[in-house]
Image (cartoon, grey):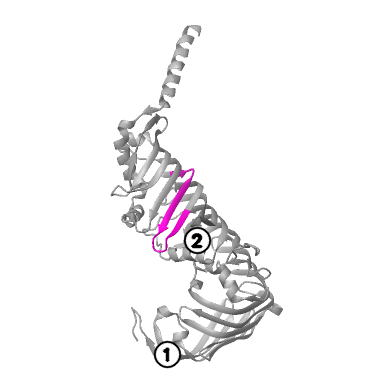
Amino acid sequence: MKKYSKYLIIALIIIAALISACFIPINASKLIPTIEKQVSDDLGVKIHIERLILRVGPLIKVKAPIMHMMYEDGQKFAQLDTVKFYIPWTSLIKKNPSIHKLDAKKLTVRVNSDDKYLPKLLNKFQTKDFGETPDIHLKNYNIAYKNKENNDNYCISGQSLELNKIANFKNFKLNTVGNFSIDSKQYISYDLTITPKLDRPDEINLKGLDDFIEQIKELDFHSDIITDLKLYKNNDIIQASGYINIDNISVLDPNKKDPKSFVYLTLWGDKASILSNIYTSANKKVYIEGMINNTKKPILDIKVKTDEINLNDLYQKVKILTDFSDLKQINNINGTLNANFTLKGDLNKIKSNGFMKISNANIKANGVKIENINSDIDFSNNAVNIVKAVGYVNNAPIMAKGSINKNIDIELLMNKVALNHLCPSSLGVKNGIASLVANITGTLDNISHKENLQIENLKVANKSTDL
């Protein structure tokens, strides 16, 4: 053994030297044109690298102190500091080098809404072959966008951002922590983890984003958002599992004196729970706690308690959240709400207690105009009794009355209601008078209905219909 020990030591020294050599940085400036072309192809932008250092290890690591990103006309719009590209050996062997991962100490982006080549660049990102895009890890980022129409400066910045490919899906898992500001004023902080087990859509619709951001500024909306969501398809329906916590909500409170509101949502596919406390003023609030199971055997369990609040105050506080629903069409609402009820049940029976009252309310929404709305709903004795529910469209009444327990018995009445104030503007109803007598009966799992509807002088005009 002693005879061969010196040879063994020499062999180990040689192996150690070879391994160490793999991790010794090598000046690779001659490779800059090749790397620039490859990175440009992989990221879909024109780039310029000042200097390269090559390290050889399990993956080929190419390090650049600075990488400039430019539009096709050479105008710089972004920069990566201390950027590292990881290239698999297998891609070199196949003579088709590709970037497996991109790490950077910092990403800085500065773009303007009127940049000539910005739309083309965004379209290029959307239509780019997903398989060519590397995983991206950023330690810091600062992305600024100047809206030249109103001279506002929007900025998202953060301490970390990771985009990792999801196996078997053309999409990325997103992990990021940061904040959103307008003109250097922070409005929203966020801690997001989103895993979309879905293929990336062919086109991302950003319509309405400018209006949404304008509402944040107009309402002086501030909040902290923490979310961890998994998105997936179930029977061709997109569902979500995880949670969304919107905390420290402040709206129209420049002095930050009012109590902070919160909304916590937990999702399990076709089940969801909510816990929320919305302050409409310094001493009035709406508390909601509940769970909805929307499976084949639906279950509802909800508790609502409010002070006597102004509906317009409530809408202003939650307006920014309604931008993701049909409620965003509301132009104006007023009146008072007072509620304290619990409602729990399935298709066989319900348990309930309490009341809900709306007084002297008016609503305008996308052409719909209903005035003098008053309702009194009694939840006592394990039944939902509609004691009174009435509103008027140009002095023509719409009424409902009846009850719901295991059985349903509800009557709806309209008398000569002007349809152009009852239907959304998008339907294009220009004229018409409707009268209705409808009865809804049966049980919760077997509803039947009968209607007698009369419409006079109907005139509809839109792109698809002209009556």
Look at mark 1 in the image and give the residue it sits on.
Answer: 432
| Magenta residues, start to end | 136-155
Hey, what amino acid is under mark 2? Gln
Extreme residue toward the top, this view: 3
Q: Specify which label sits upstream in the sequence, 1 or 2.
A: 2
In this image, 304 relative to 17: left or right? right
Percent across and percent down for residue 91 are 34, 37
SS at circle 2: strand
Residue ID at (47%, 9%)? 6
Which numbered disc, 1 or 2, marks the residue closer to the eye? 1
Asked whether 18 falls inside the magenta stretch, the response is no
Residue 168, percent across and down?
42, 49
- Taking the image as shown, residue 33 lies to the left or right of residue 22, namely left
Disc 1 to disc 2, C-alpha distance? 40 Å
Residue placed under numbered mark 2 in the picture: 239
- Magenta: main secondary structure: strand
Nearest the viewer among 384 and 176 is: 176
Looking at the picture, tell me which residue is in the foreground, 262 or 465: 262
**Which residue is rendered at x = 43% and y = 23% of the image?**
19
